[in-house]
Image: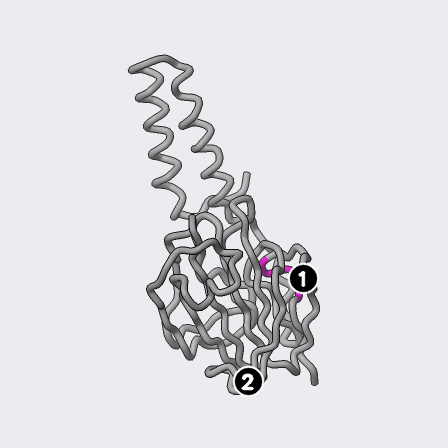
Amino acid sequence: MFPIISEGYPFIGGCLVLAILFGFSFHPMASIIPLVLALYFCYFFRNPHRIIQKSDQVVLSPADGTVTEIVPVEMDEFVGVPCNKVVIFMSVLDVHVNRSPIDGEIKLQKYYCGRFRPAYKDEVGFVNEHHLIGIENDRLRITVKQIAGILARRIVSYVTLDDKLEQGQLYGMIKFGSCLEVVMPQDVAVSVQVGQKVAGGRTVIGRISD
């Protein structure tokens, strides 16, 4: 069985308690729904072991999901040059832990309060609640934005400003369906396409030019 991230324990435990209470207070069949929910939460909060193939030549996907958009960005405030933005949508069936795409230090961190529109809407990166980090190393700067959705109303972060991250390192998660945006310089060749499934810490989304 996959390891379960600690944020899932209250959901799983609460459903198991309800299953016991319903089973004893009403009828054993009444415990089925909370038991099914407990199993789903075990699945949702899974944190599968990933062997990270580290390389300073690539940018790895920060999340499991589907690439929904790849667009040019005229200028990113943190990166400081023209960029490409890769948007990854995570459904409620995807792994929801998030991993650092590169080795580096967090040189920017901002949390924006906002709305909770569906995560597939084009403008959610601007109007929805989101958490932005800028990661820098000797070769490049990128930003990664965790965006809350209509169901994802809690962004979890384990890092803070000036923390050092290793490529593939777990740094946070978003609860219940959401999306991430990765912004990287245009001289980093995008190696995914819209509609492609990606895996956090495994799929290469960009290759760094020498």
Amino acid beneath label 1: Val
Q: Whole-percent x and y of residue 105?
A: 46, 77
Please say if 22 is above or below 114. above
Between discs 2 and 1, the one toward the N terminus: 2
Inter-mark Cα distance, 2 to 1: 29 Å
Q: Quadrant of the N terminus?
A: top right
Is 201 covered by the magenta stretch?
yes
**Residue 143 visible in image:** yes
* Residue at x 35%, y 68% (from the top left corner): 111
**Label ID, residue 138:** 2
Q: Which one is closest to the eye, mark 2 or mark 1? A: 1
Which percent across, then down, holds residue 39?
48, 33
Residue at the outermost top position: 27
What is the quadrant of residue 113 in the picture? Answer: bottom left
Image location (x, y in percent) of residue 44: 49, 43
Residue at (66%, 76%) from the top-left corner?
A: 57
Badge 2 local density, few (<14 within 10 Å), some, or many (20+)? few
Q: Residue at x 43, y 27 (%)?
A: 35
Q: Which residue is mark 1?
A: 194
Q: Which span is picked out in magenta?
A: 200-204
Are the residues tagged 2 and 1 within 8 Å (C-beta)?
A: no
What element does badge 2 sit on?
loop
